[in-house]
Image (spheres, rainbow, N blue to C red):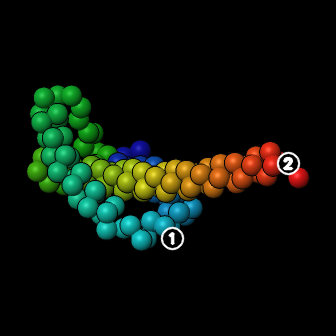
Amino acid sequence: MNSHWLYLYTTIFFAGIGNFRIWYRHGGFLKRHWKYIAVFVIITLPITVFEYFARRWGAWNYHPQHVLNIHVFGAEIETYLFMAMVAAALAGASFTYAQMEEHRKIKHRVKRRHSSRRALAWSKKP
């Protein structure tokens, strides 16, 4: 396949699957925290600049027929999109996991409180 769009399509497809799954299941919760997710993405994007040094060192390279050949600070434009999508998925998953853990802890505390009341009720003699 000789397509300059291959890296872009691959990035959107695979990183998009993770974002879609998280936002589909927990979109209501994540919409309330979109500013934090956006800040995480913005903070993460400058790390992509280090790709310039890795490519210059020869750690990896992209086939020129599979990328758009648009470079921003030495990195492919598709790489910035990939980094943004992965950062958004990680931030969303982290917020979701933290919320689920908080609900689990609250549920556990309530359950423990009710079970101790039942134990007291059973131990009382009429």
**Label 2 sits on what residue type?**
Lys
Q: Nearer the viewer, residue 53 or 31?
A: 31
Determine crowd level at label 1: few under 14, some 14-19, many 20+ residues with C-alpha closer than 10 A.
Answer: few
Find residue 71 and report its horizontal and vertical position in percent: 16, 52
Find residue 22 and report its horizontal and vertical position in percent: 50, 57
Say which residue label 2 marks.
125
State the residue at coordinates (61%, 49%): 108
Residue at the extreme right of the image, as rendered: 126
Image quarter for residue 33? bottom left
Residue at the extreme top of the image, as rendered: 58
Q: Nearer the viewer, mark 1 or mark 2?
A: 2
Marks 1 and 2, Cα distance to the nearest angstrom? 49 Å
Q: Is residue 11 above or below residue 38?
A: above
Disc 1 and disc 2 in contact, CB within 8 angstroms: no
Find residue 38 and report its horizontal and vertical position in percent: 30, 63
Quadrant into which the N terminus falls? top left
- Left or right: where 37 falls relative to 18: left
Q: Earlier in the sequence, mark 1 or mark 2?
A: 1
Say which residue label 1 marks.
28
